[in-house]
Image (cartoon, helix red, strand yellow):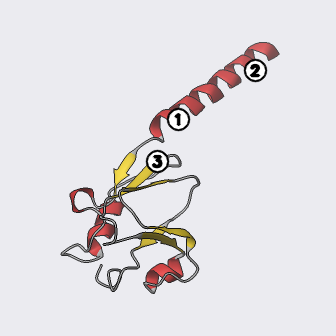
């Protein structure tokens, strides 16, 4: 009986792992057709875009932009709210399209540091 319970538990864990692997490989194009740019509707465009998505560890964010016109910098929330790159997490990605794979759970904040792009949305 003990052996059967172990096999059932192992099977359940294996199935849960398989489900996690098959569902956590989504590619999200940031801003969809708008891409990583200054949207006409401002920052609300990206807020609305993200609100309709479920992000999982293993998913990839694709930032579509032209080299020398934009960049992508991950920042903490305070820097995001202030539209500055202080305390940047990692280096700026300078050429697009840029792929960022989500390697852990939690909120992520990204800005463009070119001119006033962040302040303009």
Question: How far apart are the alpha carbons under marks 1 and 3?
Answer: 10 Å
Q: Give 24 or 1, whichever is nearer the viewer.
A: 24
Q: Secondary structure at mark 3?
A: loop
Query: Outermost residue toward the right?
Result: 2
Question: How far apart are the alpha carbons under marks 1 and 2?
Answer: 22 Å
N-terminal label among 1 and 3: 1
Q: Residue at x 57, y 70 (%)?
A: 89
Question: How far apart are the alpha carbons under marks 3 and 2?
Answer: 32 Å
Query: Outermost residue toward the front?
Result: 68
Q: Secondary structure at mark 2?
A: helix
Q: Residue at x 53, y 49 (%)?
A: 57
Q: Quadrant of residue 96?
A: bottom left
The label on residue 6 is 2
10 Å crowding of disc 1: few (<14), some (14-19), many (20+): few
Left or right relative to 81: residue 3: right
Asked if residue 1 shows in the view, the reply is no
User: Is residue 24 placed above or below 83 in the rendered structure?
Assistant: above
- Callouts 3 and 2 close, C-beta under 8 Å: no
Number of marks in the image?
3
N-terminal label among 1 and 2: 2
List the residue tagged with mark 3: 59
Instruction: Please state, as top left, top right, bottom left or bottom right, where the N terminus lies in the image.
Output: top right
User: Is residue 57 placed above or below 38 in the rendered structure?
Assistant: above
User: Which label sits in the foreground, 1 or 2?
Assistant: 1
Instruction: Please state, as top left, top right, bottom left or bottom right, where the C terminus lies in the image.
Output: bottom left
List the residue tagged with mark 1: 21
């Amino acid at each position: 009986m003990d052996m059967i319970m172990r096999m059932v538990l192992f099977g359940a864990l294996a199935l849960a792992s398989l489900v996690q692997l098959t569902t956590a490989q989504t590619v999200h194009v940031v801003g969809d057709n708008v891409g990583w740019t200054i949207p006409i509707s401002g920052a609300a465009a990206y807020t609305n875009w993200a609100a309709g998505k479920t992000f999982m560890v293993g998913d990839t964010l694709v930032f579509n932009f032209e080299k020398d016109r934009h960049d992508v910098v991950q920042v903490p929330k305070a820097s995001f709210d202030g539209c500055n790159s202080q305390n940047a997490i990692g280096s700026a990605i300078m050429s697009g399209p840029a792929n960022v794979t989500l390697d852990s759970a939690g909120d992520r904040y990204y800005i463009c540091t070119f001119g006033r792009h962040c302040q303009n949305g």
